[in-house]
Image (spheres, rainbow, N blue to C red):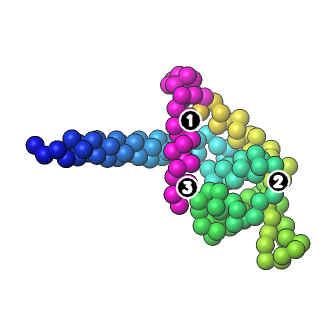
Amino acid sequence: MSPDRPVDRIAERTEDIAVALFGELFMADQLARNRISKALPKGMQLSHFSVLNHLARAGDERTPAQLARAFHVTRGAMTNTLARLEWAGHIHVRPDWDDARRKFVAISPSGRAARDAAVQVVTPVIADVVTALGAARVRALLPVLRELRVRLEGEE
């Protein structure tokens, strides 16, 4: 056996762990999106809820480009989502008074009410999962998931 062999085993185990981690993350993401989408009020898509929630938490206006970056989607995809939210009366879109090429997006009172209604129906779905896993275990997992997210954002 060569002296390099133990290093190869460690690398293989690290790669196996990486594959297992991302497999679990992808499957959990798909299942969570499916479950939350089913719980959302009729006509609200997960992308709509996500944008409304982001705007409500931000507390101020965002440009479509800022929103696209925040959600890691194309500007075209964000424009489509914003058009649907504007049509529903959930957001206000206004021109930038200093640069007519740019727009600003803000949540409307109707959008805030829709977001709050969605939070009311989604929270029990998420809380059931937290209860089943145990709040202490989930709390312990959050820093690891947060660090994973930050590392992945930094690699783009």
Q: Earlier in the sequence, mark 1 or mark 3?
A: 1
Q: Earlier in the sequence, mark 2 or mark 3?
A: 2
Query: Pointer 2 and pointer 3: residues touching (CB < 8 Å)?
Result: no
Q: Residue at 31% x, 47% y: name it.
A: 15
- Give x and y (percent) for residue 143: 56, 35
Label 3 environment density (alpha carbons within 10 Å; few <14, some 14–19, many ≥20): few
Q: Residue at 77% x, 60% y: name it.
A: 62
Query: Pointer 1 and pointer 3: residues touching (CB < 8 Å)?
Result: no
> Amino acid type of disc 2?
Asp
Label 1: which secondary element:
helix
Q: Cα distance, mark 2 to mark 3?
A: 25 Å
Q: Give the quadrant of the N terminus.
A: top left
Residue furthest toward the front? 3
Which residue is under mark 2? Answer: 60
- Give x and y (percent) for residue 60: 82, 53
Q: Cα distance, mark 1 to mark 2?
A: 27 Å
Up-down: is 55 above or below 63? above
Q: Cα distance, mark 1 to mark 3?
A: 16 Å
Which residue is under mark 1? Answer: 143
> Amino acid type of disc 1?
Pro
